[in-house]
Amino acid sequence: MGNTFKKKKQVADSRPVEYIAVNVVLLGSKDSGKNQIMIAFNNSKGADPDENREIEFIQKIVHIKEDDDDTLHFKFKVQEPIDYKKFGAVASTYYEGTTAVVLVFDPSSQTSFDAVENHFIDISYFNPKKINLPLLLVCNNKTPEKRIITEEQGKALAQKLQIPYHEANTTSYTNVEDIFAFCAREGILKGAIQTNVPQSTSFAMERH
């Protein structure tokens, strides 16, 4: 997706910082690797492929540089429903505040791949107001040596669902930040994120 985080020298600025809220929901089966995406993004480094902590949400500040050298300040809230029975009861509330949904599967797990379509259907069911949410299908290829689902199969599924496709590796922290760059950019473009930033704005993500 082309967006990468880069460290930026801090410059004193007397203007008050305004944060743009980006609320992302990660959906997938327990073995989809969505948990590692949350851990890796939170820590800004690779995550143990076998680590599976029950983290329901994280919050993280990210700075995004515009073409005119102004910097946008985003406050990400990333949620991962742990108990899907409980999630089903409150899912409509989740989607009212959500600005992007990321569907995740692990290409070493056929069950996680097969579960994607059910989660996709759930998005429509639990989004009765038909909020125009950016959607992204992510293949978390955290153990490439165990891969059984090919990139071509992943892209074919994304094409079937008519959503963008992205490959990442949370073990090596490859392309993880691009997932959230997409969520911020597309949230603005689709109007899911309420901000005064022009929809035509082009930016690259940066981490202080």
Image (cartoon, grey):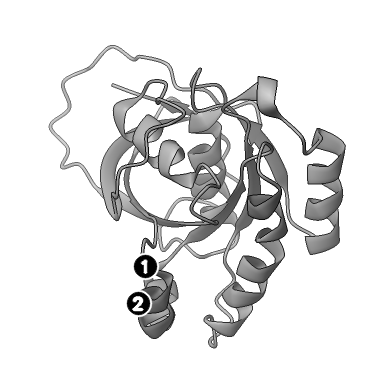
SS of the residue under disc 1: loop
Picture coordinates of residue 48, whole percent (x, y): 40, 25
Query: In front: 171, or 165?
Result: 171
Q: Is residue 91 left or right of residue 32?
A: left
Q: Residues within 10 Å of mark 2 (few under 14, many from 20)?
A: few
Do callouts 1 and 2 mark residues in contact (Cβ within 8 Å)? Answer: yes
Say which amino acid is labelled 2. Lys
**What residue do we see at 71% from left, 48% from top?**
110
Label at residue 83: 1
Is residue 71 in sight in this rendering?
no
Label at residue 201: none
Quadrant housing residue 178: top right
**What residue do we see at 35% from left, 14% from top?**
7
Say which amino acid is labelled 1. Asp
SS of the residue under disc 2: helix
Picture coordinates of residue 181, whole percent (x, y): 51, 38
Residue 69 versus residue 61 in the image, above or below: above
Quadrant housing residue 15: top left
Label at residue 86: 2
Task: Tally the numbered discs.
Answer: 2
CA distance for labels 1 and 2: 5 Å
